[in-house]
Amino acid sequence: MYVAVKGGETAIGNAHQLLAEDRRGDPSVPELSVAQIREQLSGSVDRVMTEGSVYDPDLAALALKQSRGDQVEAIFLLRAYRTTLPRLAVSLPIETGSMKVSRRISSCFKDMPGGQLLGPTFDYTHRLIDFALEAESTPQAEGKGQLADHLPQVVDLLNAEGLIERELPDADDAAVGDLTREPLMFPAGRDIRLQNLARADEGYLLALGYSTQRGYAKSHPFVGEIRSGEVAVEIDIPELGFAVDIGDITVTECQMVNQFMGSKSEPPKFTRGYGLAFGYAERKAMAMSLVDRALRAEELGEDITAPAQDAEFVLYHADNVEASGFVQHLKLPHHVDFQAELTLVRTMRAEIAAANADVELAEAAQ
Amino acid sequence: MKQAYETSATLAGYNFAFLDEQTKRMLRRAILKAVAIPGYQVPFGSREMPLPYGWGTGGMQVTAAVIGAKDVLKVIDQGADDTTNAVSIRRFFVRMTNVATTEKTREATLIQTRHRVPETPLSEGQILVYQVPIPEPLRWLEPRETETRKMHALSEYGVMHVKLYEDIAQHGHISTAYDYPVLVNGRYLMRCSPIPKFDTPKLHMNPALQLFGAGREKRIYAVPPYTEVKPLDFEDHPFEIERWPEDCALCGAHDSFLDEVILDDKGGRMFVCSDTDYCGERREAGHTGRMSAPYKAEAAE
């Protein structure tokens, strides 16, 4: 006897309890604190803040704890929280030129004013598992020095000769678009594209950026500059008549420099791709700058031949909260649609079988 | 109205129906535009909801925008009130609005649905909110939004007729079993969300307001009450709905959409109404099917 599927509510409740227990793991192992995640898993925290579009290391760490380290799930938690927050003010553009720099490199020049500063990086580490880390340790870094600020932007050094395009605000001084308030529409301006890419899934951007290096939209990239460090966030207070510093955030910025062969109206010069992410997120910022540059194909009069240049393709599929939800919605029951298809396929098969039987009958009669 | 909202006991720290009033205002403007241009997809600033995209975020935003403290809410998925996602969405709105809920189609003022239109005819004053995964009826024929918007603007729907014609030429049938394309008010080609084509005729001249929300794709559209909704077809291949070889095994209905339930691994199966409320109401009224036990009122959840 068929029993109607009742008790969905109990099942859901039980599933969530199992998940909570699973998240905690073996209770004989001490529970992680949010502060531990924030301090010791900062790579995950930075990614969750960037793609979750909220600069809040504590909240990102909490989301990571709640999602048991599942980053896309943590990003989703942060986003869903973010939409409920009021918008109190729009900050002024951050000045990365006056960043308190903890890392700054350029691959275009051997040396430049301010010098190359490696800072905390995985680069040049040998990726050997460090078994000593199984025990607790408190490393002390030497050569920390004073954090430099007001280092000149490397790309600006090329500007003296007019070799690189200038990035200037729109002449009409239009307000910057906001994808979280307005739907994505096409053609999408660069402000919207950059916002989309900043929120985009890191793995997706990495693959797309990589594809441009393998011949799908060749763009001859050089790292003009990567810099990471603290920048001040300022907001204008209308009542005061001047901007107020509301705090510092850590960001990573990548200025990619790309060759441009010139067009009828423009002499050959270098163009730029731009990447920005919260925290130390160099891979994301670099991939973003490659994709940003690829998406400028139309504006620069280049042929659109590769996936990374196709704005609709890139921008519509970049968001991992959207992608994860829609891919996983296939888990939901679809038995009504499936039933409709079953009925159709059965009808069509019966018709073909009947037609074949007719043919056989006719052949047998001959 | 605002007073009533504030006095209802909803989850602390959240506004009535989760979304802030400014967001609801934006949604209501989109809904009004959608009602004014039946079948036209209105882009809107879809918000992240606490449920994943693809799980009904568009329908939930529409519901959140139109729900009031006095509404009686019904949520169904695959026609059933007790499927897990319907339970989850209903529970979300109870937490966020504290409105009354029901499983009875007749009693509901607001029904959110996924994949089905209730069998019980709707009446004036009711609102049916559809969860829509892909709002664009031309999407499988043209992946680019910039192109499809142009095609709608020019009423350039020839490709869909060609697709249906090719189906008939190749298979002898239109091979669209669900999400059947319709022309609304003689103007816009519309996707009815993936309801089986069995339900498509129910959209036509329906006295209820039908709202469609696609959260991930950020589109809202509508079929106002008493609007013409015509499935695309050909004179010599008229639109047809599914039929089943059997009646509902529980209530004996022969006019409702039936789900096939596999009973064993030897090909045993039964067909039952996908609309659990409709089936229950019939059994309550004494109708029986070939496998039904005498009707017993089930304990309310």
Image (spheres, coloured by chain):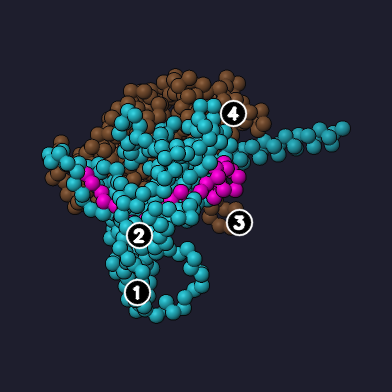
Chain colours: A cyan, B brown
Secondary structure at numbered mark 1: loop
Residue type of the residue flagged with mark 2? Ser
| Amino acid type, callout 3 | Lys
Taking the image as shown, residue A337 lies to the left or right of residue B33, namely: right
- Residue B17, given in percent of the width and then of the height, sits at 24, 44
Identify the magenta region: A208-235
Residue pointed to by mark 3: B266
Circles 4 and 3 on the same subunit: yes
Upstream in sequence: badge 4 or badge 3:
4
Tell which of B31 and A323 is nearer to you: A323
Query: Which of A138/A350 is in front?
Result: A138
Q: Which label belongs to residue A140?
A: 1
Q: Is residue B254 left or right of residue A27?
A: right
Q: Please name the amino acid that badge 4 sits on.
A: Lys
**Label ID, residue B163:** 4
Q: Secondary structure at mark 2?
A: strand
> For residue A353, which numbered disc appears in the image?
none
Tell me if mark 3 has few (under 14), some (14-19) or many (20+) residues whose alpha carbon lies within 10 angstroms of its own: few
